[in-house]
Image: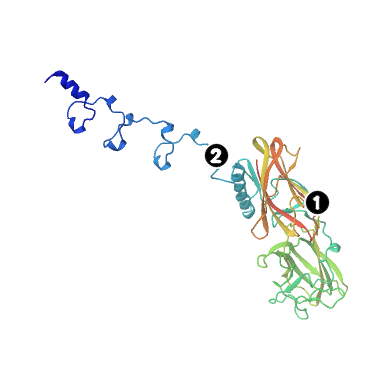
Amino acid sequence: MSTTKVTDNLRETTQVDATKITTGTIPEARITSLDATKLTGTVDNARISLDANEIPSLDTAKVTSGTFADARISESSVTQHVTGYNDATIKADILKLAIHQAVEGNRTAYNLTDSFIDGFEDDTGLTTQTNVDRDTDNEYVSAVTDGTADYTTDSYASGNRTSLITVTRSSSPELFSSTAPSNNNMFVDGITNSGNAYFGTNEVGGWLKFDFGSGVTKLVTGLRFWLTNGYAHDFKLEASNDDTNWTTIGSSVEISGGGATMMPSELWTGLSHTTKYRYYRIYETAAGTTTGGDLREVEFKIVPIVVSATGTLISDPQTASSSRTSVSGVIVYEDASGTATLGTDLKIYFTANNGSNWTEASSYATAVTYSGTKKLVTLGATTVTTGTQIAIKAVWANQSSGSKETRLHGYGVNY
């Protein structure tokens, strides 16, 4: 065989069946393209090099280990899934829960981190009260204040009170025996009317009770009696709000008549208690020395209610951890009479420089009613003059007895 002929045969071979290649090694340069389906083994990691262009989309389910660096996650990637929420909104929601707990749980004023709460459990946290007062029994602040008690200025003092007070007497022992009138017929302008209560000789433990009515409480600082005939019985003055548990507010004293002449006898005057009660009663502690005593009239010396058209409440200042330019908050209020318009009848102001500058709340959110007639309102973030001394102010207007009485039950401030 000639060498020339073999060479010519190789040049003429343009296709060789792979089965014919049984020995030797094919150089990498001879393999220019290989379909991935032809690979049946495992490719070493080092043999795979990918860049961003080669991974256009990767299912998150494929990422099963490791931690993404914060820098790899954009803020919008998070906030787009909490639409409507931001730091201020979340803080407002926390403040709502806190003020709700303070009001319903009878908490005194207290601080949270960059927040403070006051549910008016006491006067702690209140710097200024102008023409407003805190109701000690129901724990709210309103433009309703106490006036000066006097017998002549209150409708309960004298005259026909059958529609104002329910009068009842004990049946065993029967405090007013014999000719005693039936319930609710006692002391109907008793000075000129035949209605009266008659003392027997001994009814120790007997009582005469006066009820101002459901939902009505009065601060009684004195009682005056119109008496006739001669007798001497000892009584103490008691008060209650549930008609079961009674508190002694007036020491035991003797009620004595003055013969046939009508006479006023003021036995309990200037009582120092400050709690308003629905029920009051005189309770016999010692027997009388004679019979025939008539109790014609009982007059109450009641601290009157005064409603101011305007009023102002200012909280104690709180020190922020750093200078502030924005303040927000929450209030809880109630319409005792009429319907208040926030921003008109009740306005809320913020300061960050201890009252040198006040700014009204930027907005009053729609009220959410809870716990009966109490309403919770979110106050919008308000730009204030820079400072670190944070306070809140409430201002009342257009208040009038029986037509518009607005009660503020508490507030909370974020800063």
Give the vertical position of 153 relative to 26 (above or below): below
Q: Position of residue 42 (x, y in %)?
A: 28, 35
Residue at image position (80%, 51%) is 310
Give 45 or 382, whichever is nearer the viewer. Answer: 45
| Residue nearer the viewer, 332 or 278 | 332
Q: Quadrant of the N terminus?
A: top left
Quarter-of-image position of residue 29: top left
Q: Nearer the viewer, mark 1 or mark 2?
A: 2
Residue 285 image-quadrant placement = bottom right
Q: Quadrant of the C terminus?
A: top right
Is any part of residue 315 visible from this angle? no
Residue 263 at x, y percent in the picture = 86, 69
Disc 2: CA contacts within 10 A as few (<14), some (14-19) or many (>=20): few
Q: Secondary structure at mark 1?
A: loop
Say which amino acid is labelled 2: Ser
Please give the residue where the numbered disc 1 appears in the rendered image.
Answer: 310
| Mark linked to residue 3 | none
Residue at the far top: name it: 3
For label 2, the SS is helix
Is 327 drawn above or below residue 205 in the view shown? above
Q: Which mark is residue 76?
A: 2
